[in-house]
Image (tube, rainbow, N blue to C red):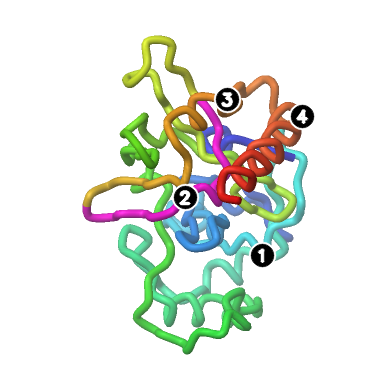
Amino acid sequence: MLNSFSQLLGTPVDGSDGDLGHVREALLDDRSWALRYLVIETGDWFNGRKLLLSTQSLRASALRGGPLRAQLSRQQLHSCPPLDTSHPLTRLQERRLLHHYRLSEYWSGDGEPFDGDAVHLRPRSELKGFAVCASDAVIGHLRDFVVDDEDWTLRSLVIDTSGWWKDGQLVMIDPQSVAQLDMPARQLHLRLTRGQLKASPPFDVPALPPPLSESIPAQRKERATYWM
């Protein structure tokens, strides 16, 4: 099922032996646009600490008001390697965390040598508000993300164009339309023109998931034609 990430904030997370906490933040992979980790704020059982939960540990979930369910216990979460969730997570820290949870290293097989200092995970809150630049103009800012809770891939970026067009609105674009993420300048550069982005499907929370799942592939087809 598709959900905007703003809808996921505050969602309770249940483990194999009880409530683990609730969702406070997410870490996104800036290369594959996958949601890799949720930041969970624990309850009284662990003094409200914030811990990282790999999305590999989550069962597919039809949310819409229900909790997320993780395939791990409070003890597993309690004993995970200490990490400062307010700082970038290095690849070496990720390796230790995944080994603790006995999960696979999702980057294995990408053909690149292991770099323990590499940082490819970005907090959702850090990316929100980035200026969005089409190939021919600045056309909005990043407002939200739409996530598939079956595999935790990012299905679309939600762009707010209201400050750039008189009839501007929230529109959805395929994450693969991103050409470059400029962190120092806080800019997201697209492979789309201003006209293509203006023609993108509107973002409508009550309409998720059917219109989104139908409209995004059409945009991908349009982009493929544009680059041929």
Pair 4/1: label in front:
4
Task: Please report contact status of discs 3 and 4: CB closer than 8 Å, yes or no.
Answer: no
Q: Secondary structure at mark 3?
A: loop
Identified at 48% across, 51% down, the residue is 26
Find the residue positioned furthest to the top.
166
Q: Secondary structure at mark 1?
A: helix
Pair 2/1: label in front:
2
Identified at 65% across, 53% down, the residue is 152
Q: Secondary structure at mark 2?
A: strand
* Dot 2 alpha-carbon crowd within 10 angstroms: few under 14, some 14 to 19, many 20 or more: many
Q: Is residue 68 magenta?
A: no
Residue underneath mark 3: 203
Mark carried by residue 56: 1
Mark carried by residue 210: 4
Stretch of the chain drawn in magenta: 171-184
Pair 3/2: label in front:
2
The first of marks 3 and 4 along the sequence is 3
Pair 2/4: label in front:
2
